[in-house]
Image (cartoon, rainbow, N blue to C red):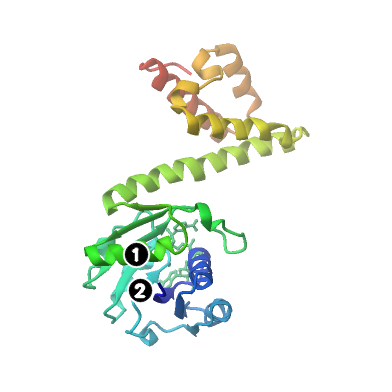
């Protein structure tokens, strides 16, 4: 199938989605950005028309994908005078913000995107929702033109999924950054940790993560914990260490622990 699509937003997600949809043979009719040069850059790669004015959005497209900041989705949606199916790409915003339109939904690719980094679309799950069954079927066809990793998830559950996504991606990434800083500051090679990091993800995804937890917090190894806390210069990181250690111990022992 070949859908007629308008992409609103030329940031990380708008760029990646426009490019992959174009590569799968869909017609990208228009690309919007408030900065015309950004829209033009993407439009050139997808044979689309570049626009910087929402009133210029055509009403004949089948699908409108709003990929702008979460807090701008409603404002943008409210300015659209169109009949087609309007979707957004946010994990945390309800599709209700689009309810000015008769047909609306969610086209949420659950992955972390940076404009300048390549994305492996074979593995990226699509979380779909729509207020009409035939539109959900349509979104499914569009998503399956990219890959078969398709899920139907309503706004309420999508928000919980997004919270989990923040934990597995943003929080874990931050902790890796903290560990890397510690290594860099003390001239120890961070790469020594990479096999451990990979094994952690492998084990946690193949088992119940709580069943395979190791380390000083679960052993209640108080001297090691004390030593670690002394090695951390910043109070913020000492608090972070204590908070996570408490969470590990409390989840395992089912009671509060003094760390
Ligand atoms: N990045 C990710 O990893 C990721 C993953 C899944 C879902 N998402 C979701 O996808 C959406 C876009 O995220 P992103 O990472 O692509 O953001 P981004 O790179 O920062 O791009 C956001 C776009 O929003 C536009 N924008 C901001 N305020 C606007 C307004 N008031 N009116 C019109 N346009 C406005 C910006 O336009 P200008 O270019 O004109 O400044 C920019 O093109 C968000 O809902 C986000 O939650 C992101």
> Could you tell whether 51 is left or right of 101 in the image?
right
Does mark 1's beta carbon lie closer than 8 Å to ligand 1? no
> Could you tell whether 178 is left or right of 63 in the image?
right
Numbered mark located on residue 203 in the image: none
Inter-mark Cα distance, 1 to 2: 9 Å
**Residue 65 image position (x, y, % from top left):** 39, 70
The residue sitting at 41% across, 62% down in the picture is: 143
**Residue 202 image position (x, y, % from top left):** 55, 33
- Mark 1 — residue? 139
- Give the quarter of the image for residue 166: top left
Of label 1 and label 2, which has the lower sequence position? Answer: 2
Is residue 234 visible in this depiction of the protein? yes
**Residue 231 image position (x, y, % from top left):** 66, 25
Q: Residue furthest right?
A: 187
Is residue 112 visible in this depiction of the protein? no
Of 179 and 109, nearer the camera is 109
The residue sitting at 44% across, 64% down in the picture is: 145
> Could you tell whether 55 is left or right of 147 in the image?
left
> Is residue 36 placed above or below 204 in the rendered structure?
below
> Is residue 44 placed above or below 256 in the rendered structure?
below
Where disc 2 sits, the SS reads strand
Of 248 and 16, nearer the camera is 16
Where disc 1 sits, the SS reads helix
Q: In which quarter of the image is the N terminus?
A: bottom left
Q: Residue furthest front?
A: 1
Mark 1 or 2: in front is: 1
Numbered mark located on residue 63 in the image: 2
> Is residue 246 placed above or below 88 in the rendered structure?
above
């Amino acid at each position: 199938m070949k859908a007629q699509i308008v992409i609103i937003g030329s940031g990380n997600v708008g760029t990646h989605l426009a490019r992959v949809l174009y590569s799968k043979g869909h017609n990208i009719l228009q690309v919007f950005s408030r900065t015309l040069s950004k829209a033009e850059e993407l439009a050139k790669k997808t044979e689309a028309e570049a626009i910087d004015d929402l009133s210029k959005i055509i009403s004949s497209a089948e699908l409108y994908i709003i990929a702008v900041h979460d807090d701008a989705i409603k404002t943008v949606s409210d300015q659209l005078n169109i009949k087609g199916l309007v979707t957004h790409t946010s994990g945390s915003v309800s599709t209700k913000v689009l309810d000015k339109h008769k047909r609306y939904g969610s086209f949420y690719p659950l992955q972390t995107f940076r404009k300048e980094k390549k994305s492996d679309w074979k593995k990226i799950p699509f979380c779909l929702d729509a207020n009409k069954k035939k539109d959900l079927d349509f979104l499914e066809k569009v998503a399956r033109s990219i890959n078969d990793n398709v899920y139907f998830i309503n706004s309420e559950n999508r928000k919980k999924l997004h919270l989990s996504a923040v934990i597995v991606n943003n929080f874990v990434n931050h902790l890796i950054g903290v560990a890397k800083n510690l290594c860099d500051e003390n001239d120890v090679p961070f790469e020594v940790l990479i096999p451990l990091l990979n094994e952690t993800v492998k084990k946690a995804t193949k088992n119940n993560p709580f069943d395979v937890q190791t380390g000083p917090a679960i052993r209640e190894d108080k001297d090691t914990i004390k030593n670690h806390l002394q090695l951390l210069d910043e109070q913020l990181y000492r608090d972070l260490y204590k908070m996570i250690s408490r969470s590990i111990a409390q989840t395992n022992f089912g009671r509060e622990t003094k760390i």
